Amino acid sequence: MKVFEVAKSGMDVEWQRLTLIAENLANMNTVRTPDGDTYRAKRLLTGPDLAFDQVLSGANLNSPAGVRVYSVERSESAPFKVNDPNHPYADLEGNVIYSNVNHAEEMALALKTSRVYEANMAMFSIARQTYASALNIGRA
Amino acid sequence: MSEVSAITAVSAISANDKTSQSTAAQKAETVSFEAILRDGMASLQSDIQKATDAVQRFALSSDMPIHDVMIAMEKARFSVELTLEVRNRLVEGYREIMNMQI
């Protein structure tokens, strides 16, 4: 039943990625976060679900392990600077620094994420059909 | 060249089969059929319980992604289907023997 576990891990990860994209889009117009910094787009870093000691011991690195979240990192692209002297957060030169969330980039990522989620769902249903046909061994 | 290596591969597999068969036979002596059935029923029960728990948690808080619930239910269904199939074949075999003409 490893196929189902692997497909489920993919769905879990893509769901979290989708949540982060929603968070980024919701914070597009954020000028300042509670820690006083500008908001920066969050990115999910993911990879094979292996622990470091497993890699060190070199045990079954080729066996399927699924995927898991490594960490959430901030995008380092430059934030948008807008000249708006009347804004409460405008600096001395009248510039307001908005978040670095890029609308097109987030939408493209959201679409890709949803496609990968769908792919994992397709994988699940293929495995499901295979399982069902295996139950018919000796019957057909 | 490839044919020769294929033949050696086959013989290696058949050798493997023999050893695995003998170990399986040894194991089969210790594990009764009834115990296998009981284990299967226990795992079916736990799968159904997991699905019920997942549905309950989802109903209580929407924090849980929906695919978790669906996958738990789907797994419960696999278990039920497998159990049904085992039961059907058992009954079939039983009938076959009962209908034997002596």
Image (tube, coloured by chain):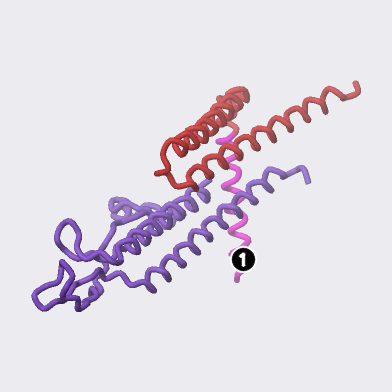
The percent position of residue A114, horizontal first and vertical second, equals 48, 62
State yes or no: residue B17 in magenta. Answer: yes
Residue farthest along the front direction in this orientation: A86
- Place residue B73 in its image quadrant: top right
Q: Which chain is red?
A: B
Residue type (three-letter) at the residue carrying disc 1: Val
Residue at position x 60%, y 43% in the image: B18
Q: Quadrant of the N terminus of chain B?
A: bottom right
Q: Give residue A51's position: percent from left, percent from top.
A: 31, 51
Q: Relative to B70, say whether B5 is above or below.
A: below
Q: Which residue is mark 1?
A: B4
Name the residue at 60% across, 23% down.
Answer: B32
On the rendered structure, is A93 left or right of A2?
left
Indicate the colour of chain A: purple
The residues colored magenta run: B1-24
How many numbered callouts? 1
Quarter occupied by the C terminus of chain B? top right
Q: Quadrant of residue A137?
A: top right
- Is A79 or A98 nearer to us in this picture? A98
The foreground one among B14 and A47 is A47
Parent chain of label 1: B
Measuring 78% from the left and 46% from the top, which residue is drawn there? Answer: A140
